[in-house]
Image (spheres, rainbow, N blue to C red):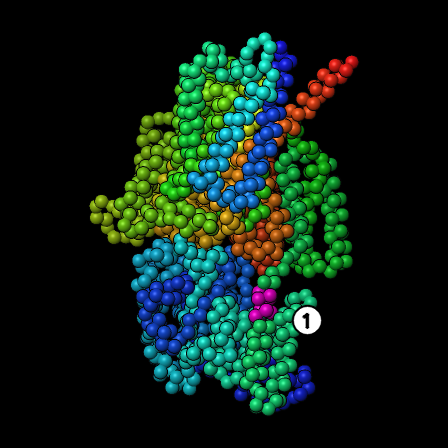
Amino acid sequence: MRSFSAVNLQVLHNVTMLEGYGQCGKINVDELYKPSVGRLVVMVIDALRWDFVEGAEGRLNMPYTASLIDGKKACLLTGKARPPTVTMPRIKAMTTGTVPNFVDVALNLGSNKILEDNLLLQARHHDMKLIFYGDETWLKLFPNVFLRSEGTTSFFVSDFTEVDDNVTRHLSAELSKEDWRLMFLHYLGLDHIGHVEGPRSLLVRPKLQEMDHIVKRIHHSFMAWDKHFGFPSLLVVCGDHGMKNSGSHGGASPEEVLVPLVFIGNVCSGDLASGMWEDMLTASVPQIDLVPTLSVLLSLPIPTTNLGKMIPALLQNMPVSQQLYALYYNCKQVAAHFEHNIVNSATQASYLEYVEAMMLHASWLTSSNSSKSGLAERIARLYMSGLTGMSSKLADSQVTFDMPLLVAASGILWQMVVILAMDVRPRAVTLMLTFFINIMLLSLSVVWCSYNQSSSIICSYTPITTPVLLGVITVFAGNVSVILTSRFRSVKFSQIRRLDQGQAICLVGTLLHVISLSSSSFIEEEHQVWYFFWLTFAIANLYELCSVVLFKKSSVPVSRRHTSQEKDKSNWLLWNWLGLLFLHRVLRKWNQTGDKWASLPDVGDWLIQQEQRTYLSVVLLLGLVAVCCCCLCLPAQSPGTYRWLIEAGLCTAAAVCVYCYRSAIGNVDIPFTYPHSRGVREVRIFWSILILILAKGLGESLYEMKVKHHSPLCVFRCLLRTSTCCWLLMCILLHRPHNVILIAAQVFMSKCVGSTYASHRSHKSNIWWLVIGHVWIGNVVYFYQGNSNSLATIDIASGYVGQTGYNPIVVGTLLVINTYSAPVLSYLLLLFWEQFYSSHYCLALLRLLPVAVYVVLVMFLRYHLFVWTVFSPKLLYKTTHTLSSKLSTLTSVAFRLDERNAILKRYYDASFHELLGLLRHQRRSALVVVTESSSTSSRICAVLVPTETVIGALFWEKSGEQLFVTGG
Amino acid sequence: MFQPAVEDGQRLVAFYSGVTCVYLPIIMCVLYSADYLYSIGKYSFSPVIGIILVTECSKYLIGTHHVVRRNTTGAGRYDERYIIASTKKNSTKNRMKEGMKCFLLIIVMTAIYYTIAVLFGAQIFTKHEETFMLSVLLCVLTVFPACLHMGANSVIGLLFGQKPSNDVLNTLILRNIQLTLFGTWLGAFVIPLDWDRAWQEWPIPCASGALLGFTAANLLMVITVVPKLMKRNSAKCGRKQR
């Protein structure tokens, strides 16, 4: 561990401030910079949001704390957390005073040691004893810092009491001990309640009262401590982030960002409204400001990385000279960063204020007493406003962009799009060409780097980055040569002009969606776009069917026109589509998502309430039955009653397991008394059933292949059926109980689209129609489920279904399965209707085109106000989405020998470049991202490979065989 | 016989579209300057819809009686072949029947538009007034003129995708319907934007989209028809002079 303290101390003791101005007076730093707080207790309550503590609500929730605030023994300030509002980055901000960026969200699950200078490290170096109880993350961030500590794992979300009891049980012993100076407590229970039940849960108030009781206990022991240490003690109660009305967090809405900061102790007991700070006291306090403030109060060196500024309210009780010195010190330290990081720093207004304040300060020190008070106030104000300006400017400019890498990544992404749109026929000449282009690019990059002296990764030839650079260049060159030697797919404009309505809508919709990505509100409200397109698509189909039924308009060729059966089918389809429309209207209210209207009441919220448990049970039961039916109704290759019975039995057993699990953890009612359990057993039984089903499917297909000598395609369909069945069952386990019914709805939607396609096959020979239909279904259901482009909507609880401990790989896998269940399911369902190779092309192009456009857009919008809150989470989502869909496609296509080379390369390239796209955003922690993203991808691999390699293996067998088996 | 019919049709369409291109923008400008556009979804907007109705009617009357010359061979007007009544002589009873049919059709279409708006996401339990006014406006712009010119049966046929005969008036009506609906559809895109403007309220963007779409359709027709008419006229003049 690097130590910064030496540097800091030097700053503190050797530099007398007035040297530079030549008016030297002797400054006794020890006099000016001395502790004003003895013992410090920092109590972090996870997800404590502002309105839990403030006002009338606060008096009910935390009566003791409220009485302290009213009695001027404590002060309540509004803290402001920067997004991402997730625990780990927030802890980092509160201890180092830096602004962690978005990559830290990805790292939130596996937190690493903090290498930067921080408050805790400084305290330890100055022989203060620290103790810690609470969230394990702290121990990972600060290993070997605490004298005594115990971590509780934050990842078992459904546990509301034990996490907190594990913290509190140490309290009585520690309160009476005298060896420690700083105590950190981190309570997780409230966050867990929020994740599972939301902020309006009945459990919130008792939990807050419990917290209040702890505050009371700590405050009561202040008296003894004050005597022992000779300085007043201080208790800081704060939330690390808030929570949305839906209970989760991660975004930038006021509910998530605003947190209370309560300072209890004599330091803050003065009358807030008086003194020289008056107007600055009511403003909200950025979370990073805690760092310099606490450092000053404890007379520790301010951590070098700090960008925060003093909280004026806490300086009030100090003598003026001390206040000014503290401000000067803070200012000087921030100004050093400012000079280093900001262009033209010396001419910025805030910097000039700082310089002026310094000069006035110098003259103040030498001047006589008479004029001092007025001047002091002016100096303090100047310091403060200078600090504020510099601090906020620094916080905003923390991120640097690696433009060369950025351009390279998006360039390759676009190459992929072009190649996908081309008819590729690799030839021998490409190898030579690739080689030459390779060398050319390499030399170009070297020349460019040496000429420009860029600080990009591309130009730093370290052992780790050189392979990356070489890889990038090789891929780039390979793509160029492929593009040069092949030609575009022939698209005739007459074809485009003769599109029918459905196809036109598909085309316009795809383009409009791509355009809509440039607007932050359309990203926040992406579900609206998809709902809108999906409904347009459905209405256009309905309209067409109507005209067929009403006017016998020929939509099929003359040869097989209108037998009565055909007409019946049309009628049936018509009703199906009509039902689909109304189903959509209901389901879009199922989970309100997005940003603007997310807080409106929806069906899901209503069902989750405790009073509506009976209805929830009914809905879950309906959903389970429907999904079981779907499983059994998947088109089977060789039907047989015996087999069917086995399958029905297994599916029912799995569904029963899910229901029992839900009732065991208290989500739904069960009519008879059920033995007490935590639901782990049920889930284990469920998994074993799933394995049975998988084994049965495998055995069946082996039997068909080896004994009956069916064609590989039959075997493929058999396996597809098994894997779809498994996927469906996995989804019903992981989805929230009220969302289970959505899976059945998705199967129904796919059936409507597929059978329309099948019945009009000759007419709509265009495969795009089917593929786009399924992609849209996937997206629509994804949003029905309550997902959005904010990190806050990831349903963390689903990662812990049936888990007793925290295993990052398992939890991550389950989370990815739950979140992306809809797109993957719609891909599987698409395979039922069409296994043509070209459908994969369509799919890949459809997936890649928006991504490529989006990457370029984000590149241009990188200084946009919302880049961290809106655009980069979307990028993360898109990357994971593409990775998961790519991997599922990849595995099912990869083993086909004939087109194998081309397609493999494309998919790998595509995924690789999306990773690059992610990577360029966080240059500072680029390497971390690489490892992180590789672990992400391996996680997804783990999910998809078992189900999908099966399919892939079959494709291998199929190569050279007939492909023309129709869906339906 | 054929030639004059085509010319009549073109002249009629030019007249209709020309008038629409003038009066609708004027109405919209007046509404805009009077800040009345925001009440587009309120019942208080009905006078404006009334004005549109009256103008469409008078357009039809003037068009059929004055713009198109009476055919000397018979008393028929250019577009009367669509009206079933005319085949069985213009008895009042048949006219009444036809009128009732149109009226019913308009009501049914209003209901359908309302349903579609709700399906697209308009609130079910609130904002009835707004959604209703939008569907009425759409009906007035699409179904009503079509009914005037073609009669209910042909309109139903047209609405459900029967290929219209290759006729200028038909094209006008079809294009009117298509572009009006497309404008409404496109208008909905601004609703989710987070600009918090008054004009983003439901159904203002959709209704204005419909009006704009309607105007655009007419403008398009003027642009395509007028040059043809001019050409023909000049050719005629040339012939006369010679």
Q: Is residue A186 visible?
A: yes
Residue marked by disc 1:
A346
Taking the spot 65% from the left edge, 45% from the top edge, the residue there is A412
Residue A157, how many percent across, how many down? Answer: 38, 56
- Is disc 1 placed on a helix, strand or loop? helix
Quarter of the figure with the C terminus of chain A: top left
Which residue occupies the foreground of this view, B230 or A319?
B230
Q: Magenta: predominant secondary structure element?
A: helix
Taking the spot 44% from the left edge, 70% from the top edge, the residue there is A77
Quarter of the figure with the N terminus of chain A: bottom right
In the image, what residue type sits under mark 1? Ala
A47 in magenta: no
Give the magenta range.
A387-395
Residue A481 lies in quadrant: top right
Residue B137, how many percent across, how many down? Answer: 48, 34
Taking the spot 51% from the left edge, 71% from the top edge, the residue there is A289
- Crowdedness of circle 1 by 10 Å Cα count: few (<14), some, many (20+)? some
Residue A198, how many percent across, how many down? Answer: 37, 55
Residue A682 to residue A380: above or below? above
Residue A82, how many percent across, how many down? Answer: 51, 62
Which residue occupies the foreground of this view, A180 or B113?
B113
Taking the spot 65% from the left edge, 56% from the top edge, the residue there is A402
Q: Is residue A949 visible?
A: no
Residue A477 lies in quadrant: top right
A392 in magenta: yes
The count of marks equals 1
Instruction: Give the farthest residue toward the right.
Output: B242
Instruction: Give the farthest residue toward the top.
Output: B73
